[in-house]
Amino acid sequence: MMIKWLGHSAFQIITDENLKILIDPFISNNPACDVAVEELSADVICVTHGHTDHFGDTMEIANRTGALIVCNHEISVYLSKQGFETLGMNMGGTVQVQDIIITMVNSTHSSDMDFIEEVSAGGSAGGFIIELENGRKIYHAGDTGVFGDMRTVIRDIYRPDIAMLPIGDRYTMGPFEAAIAAEWLDPEIIIPMHYNTYPAIEQNPLEFSDMVRRSNPNVKVVILQPDQIYQE
């Protein structure tokens, strides 16, 4: 299994069975991403919410690759009307794509669709638990503040092995709150995201890593640079 950080909250996951999953593919207008959108292939695109810096190039990539778009119901309805193949879902729901199991979980954030000319309601923002063919579980938190479900529902029911957590502050939780989330979730691996894309969310990930080490030394923080890979 390979996880590549594309900058901001965008990730590409390639599973052991070579299924290609993109999460929040904000690529072409992402100043932290050096990958050309034309270079990316996908079988599945997971979209956490309707903000431009997460929805990104979803339609262009899906149109070129034929990827299935997994998202909340409201965004699914909009995309279906544009002719895309979608799998709409909602909080607590689970779908299966080939041998991958995807569950949508809560986040605390807004989700208007601001990628269209007239901003429209985009349902609720969420995160995803993605269970791979080998049973490893990846939690992409989307945009969120720290919230109690991380300590109970997400940890106790889904038990993620790898967690991708925003640390940028201002629009999401910052390093201090993310370190608390890391303690509550208790995964093996944490990959920080949603930071240093813009001046408003500049952070030092090493400070976050130090906080995590002090509060939960059993958790390993993997700091990636854009276009860098974590592999198991």
Image: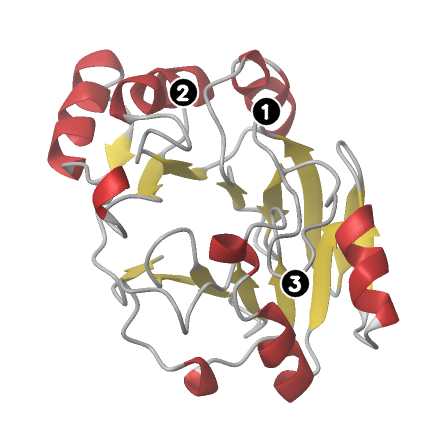
Image coords of residue 8 (percent x, y) = 35, 53
Q: Which mark is residue 181?
A: 2
Q: Secondary structure at mark 3?
A: loop
Please, is residue 180 above or below residue 18 in the view? above
Say what amino acid the circle numbered 1 marks: Ile
Q: Report whether 130 appears left or right of 142.
A: right
Indicate left or right for 111 with 201 as reference. right
Residue 131 percent across, percent down from the top left? 61, 48
Kind of residue at disc 2: Ala
Amino acid of disc 3:
Glu
**Residue 130 place in picture, x, y as percent:** 60, 48
Q: Nearer the viewer, mark 1 or mark 2?
A: 2
- Which label sits in the foreground, 3 or 1? 3
- C-alpha distance separating marks 1 and 2: 11 Å
> Does residue 155 sit above or below 39 in this rendering?
above
Residue drawn at (53%, 64%) of the image? 22
Q: CA distance from mark 3 to mark 2?
A: 35 Å
Quarter where residue 121 is shown: top right
Residue at disc 2, secondary structure: helix
Q: Nearer the viewer, residue 126 or 190?
A: 126
Q: Which mark is residue 117?
A: 3
| Residue matched to label 1 | 154
Specify the color scheme.
secondary structure
Image height of 92 relative to 215, above or below: below
Please state, as top left, top right, bottom left or bottom right, where the N terminus lies in the image.
Answer: bottom left
